[in-house]
Image (spheres, rainbow, N blue to C red):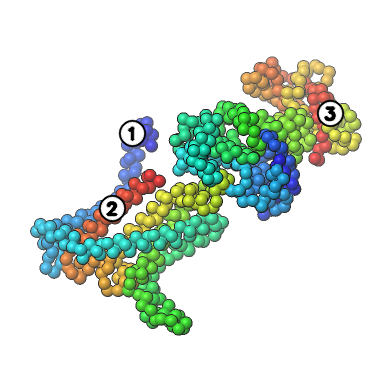
Amino acid sequence: MKSEVKTQPVSRSRGRRLGAFVFLSPGLTYLVVFMLVPLALVMSYTVFQRGRFGGVVYEFTTENFERLIDPLYLSVVGESLKIAAITTVLALLIGYPTAYLIAQLPPRWKTMALVAIVLPFWTSFIIRVYAWTILLSGPGLLNSALAKLGLGPFELLYNQGTIMAGLLYSYLPLMVLPLYAAIERLDPQLREASANLGASGFTTFRKVTLPLTVPGVLTGCMFVFVPSFGNFVVPDMLGGNKSIMVGNLIRNQFLSARDWPFGATLALALIAVLVLLLIAQAWAARRA
Amino acid sequence: MLKIDGVSRRFGDVIALNDVSLEIGQGEFFALLGPSGCGKTTLLRIIAGFETPDAGRVSLDGADLLSQPPNRRPISLMFQSYALFPHMTVAKNVAYGLERERLPRQEIKERVGEVLETVGLSAHASRKPAQLSGGQRQRVALARSIVKRPRLLLLDEPLSALDKKVRADMQLELKRLQHEVGITFVVVTHDQEEAMSLADRIAVFDSGRVRQVDEPIELYERPRSPFVADFVGANNLFRGEASGLDGIKSEKFGMLAGTPLTELAAGAEALLAVRPEKIELADAGATRGLAGSVLDVSFYGGVSHISVDVPGHPKPVLVAVQGAGSVRAGAQVKVRWDAKDAVIMAADQ
């Protein structure tokens, strides 16, 4: 790529750069105004003191970071990491076979299956999560069905398992789609070549299919982990009134505790963890 | 050694293979030749185990092949696209089949080293396929196929992805290798020159049927059907009626000299085929021959191809002469041949 650019006449490459800028500028402007600027503002709050009724008093302090390493808050970050990680692993275990099967379907069925995967996104996220509370609540659908069998009622809502189920349900499609793209792209003759050389179906999967779809696996894991880790809607609705995940904690700091600087510090911690993970993912994807 | 008996396969309305029977001997270099879509690749995939025939039997050394899964057959297939594993080095690609046999590591290393030396890629053992040229990839694929010492090696259009110069080298190399390792080779190709230069015997396929199985020279000089005459090499075909022994009676040209390959009833529709290099160009004043005018002269170095428009014949008559031709476009000439150099066959075969 680099040498290709170098051999271009100067004027042409400059023209191309200008063209790229024209096409990118609407998106760039949007990102700068609505993401970078607010982000920078929020980040700046981390070194200031809280206002009495919310807002910020612009006096320097390191107090927020000192609070951050309090075991109470660190454990919330840890719990969030755990919940997001388990959700991601489950999504991978369910998503891989699903994506693999879809990739084997005849073209017409393939499209139908993919539409079915994306279909839930046509309904509001909140409504779909709310539907889970109806399914799982004390007198809800599942419990009344179990009651007919003489079982229950069980406490199905408001625990970590419910949160994971909700996150898994919400973000599974984001695992399936990149995996499907990676598997679909694989030359089917590679699998035939593997069989021809004496490999069983499982060995072919382990030695050929899986290694060649690692980039898809990493992308899918990121797509599930990132929104799960910072999520506050699902734990709020399915996890009860406890701030068990870092997303809830941040929201509570801004809206209930009126401690913007500490909320901003927590947000910074969340972003830092995600950026580290993204760097790790990019590094692993390049090696794969 | 390999026996294919009455194999048929259809895909929906398309009959890919129609009652194909072939027998291929130990150590033979055998070619399946035909235009694309004639069923030759389907047959290859049936032998390798990636397709199942609707009817028929395939056996190797007397043992039924069709009941065995592809990974248990002692058969290697070299894919047209080579299907090298992109995430493995050359050495790893070649070792893959041996590792599946759970051979001791030392033996695998030795055999991979040997075979890489045979194909001249020892220096590239630690490269990835993407870092190799087309010819080198082809040799890796070949090494990966023969390192398992299969009973039978199937090659699907082995040279089609290479440019002309490399192809000629690889042709020689394939032949040398086959001689060296003594494995039975079955090569699928649509390139009749490739088939003729490589194979001991050739089966010509057309629309799912085997038209003729013969040695290259036989196939070239004594095609048994119009399809084979037309498909294998360049040919000039004349229609007419069988007229007894030494020629056909053509409506436009009267008697045309030729040798019938089989007994033909007088009056039956027949086709006379004469190769370009068997035709002689004569002056327009010559006593014998079909009169025409030269359309074009193409110089290929060793030979020249001269196309002659003969009024009454639908296609120009192609004549091949040694060296640069002495005639020019527009010249009036006559084309003629000896009866022994033209073959006559039934038109409906």
Asked if both marks, 2 and 3, belong to the same chain, the answer given is no
Q: Secondary structure at mark 3?
A: strand
Tag 1: amino acid: Ser
Tag 3: amino acid: Thr
Q: Residues within 10 Å of mark 3 (few under 14, many from 20)?
A: many
Left or right: A132 in relation to B306: left
**Can residue A26 be seen?**
no
Q: Chain of mark 3?
A: B
List the residue tagged with mark 3: B259
Q: Residue at x 79, y 35 (%)?
A: B224
List the residue tagged with mark 1: A11
Residue B333 placed where, x, y %? 75, 20
List the residue tagged with mark 2: A275
Left or right: A41 in relation to B201: left
Left or right: A88 in relation to B188: left
Q: Residue furthest left?
A: A59
Q: Secondary structure at mark 1?
A: helix
Q: Along the polypeptide, which appears first: circle 1 or circle 2? A: 1
The count of marks equals 3
> Which numbered disc, 2 or 3, marks the residue closer to the eye?
2
Disc 2 and disc 3: Cα gap in Å?
A: 83 Å
